[in-house]
Amino acid sequence: MRKIILPDILPGKEAHLKLAPETRVSSLIKEQTPPLTARESAVLVMLNPTKDNNGNTVRDKNKWTLLLIKRNTYHGVHSGQIAFPGGKCEIYDIDYKATACREAYEELRIDQEKIEIIGELTKLYVPPSNFTIYPILAINNGIEKYFPEEREVTDYLHIPLGFFNPENAKKCRVEITPNSWIHAPGYLINGHIIWGATAMIIAELYQIVN
């Protein structure tokens, strides 16, 4: 199986800008570091290798699937959104990998022993929630079933990475708060819109793989 090797210099902002909401573009261009007041979080960006008819792993990573979840509705800016498993860093997490793995276990019962951590993608600051997200890239090494924590997760999706070619993104009108809408590039699939920080992180992963 051909592994994913992260480059020494990640695409970062160059990739993020391709899927940034219109209201975020100018501030992202100027931004050098997240605000000192920003809170920290981590997400698990997990690829699932696809098998061919003979049971061999497909070499084309664009045919591998990306794991995403649909968050439950709650009083918050990311209510009901399609996202990666993850959440805020706690004082007992030794690093961002620990945060991402802990949250993935809490939300989907993902066993850390059955995933291979590849490394970190570029951190991304999200102004509406004042969180800096640290994406942890991993490969599924044997997880076949997930157990969503119903208070936080209503569903999960496996989407081929090739679907996320930035050229396939559409201009979407999304509701950020009740009766408040913005335009943002995103991906439409099965009635879901994948946009914002999630789409921006995916844009970097897609660029690295391709």
Image (tube, grey):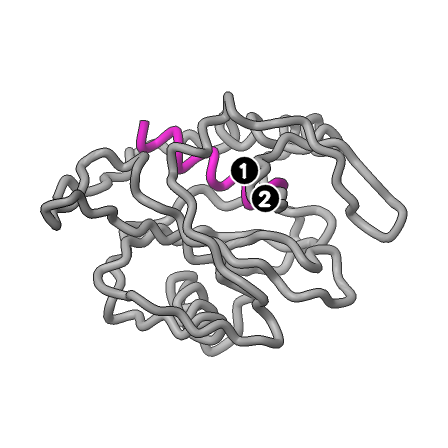
Residue under the point 64% across and 54% down: 81
The amino acid at mark 2 is Ala
Q: Is residue 35 left or right of residue 69?
A: right
Towards the viewer: 17 or 61: 61
- Residue 25 in magenta? no
Q: Position of residue 79 (x, y in %)?
A: 70, 59
Q: Is residue 20 left or right of residue 57?
A: right
The tag on residue 200 is 1
Magenta residue span? 194-210
The amino acid at mark 1 is Met
The answer to which quarter of the image holds residue 18 is: top right
- In the rendered image, the residue lying farthest to the front is 53
Task: Mark 1 and mark 2 in contact? Answer it, CB < 8 Å.
Answer: yes
Pick the quarter of the image with the N terminus: top left
Pick the quarter of the image with the C terminus: top left
What residue sits right under mark 2 in the picture?
197
Towards the viewer: 48 or 202: 48
Please tell me whether the stretch drawn in magenta is mainly helix, strand or loop: helix
Q: Position of residue 163 (x, y in %)?
A: 44, 34
- Residue 206 in magenta? yes
Neighbor class of circle 1 (other Cα within 10 Å; few <14, some 14-19, many 20+) is many
Q: Position of residue 173 (x, y in %)?
A: 75, 35
Towards the viewer: 85 or 49: 49
Secondary structure at badge 1 equals helix
The answer to which quarter of the image holds residue 100 is: bottom left
Q: CA distance from mark 1 to mark 2?
A: 5 Å
Above or below, comparing residue 114 to residue 196 in the picture: below
Above or below, comparing residue 197 to residue 115 in the picture: above
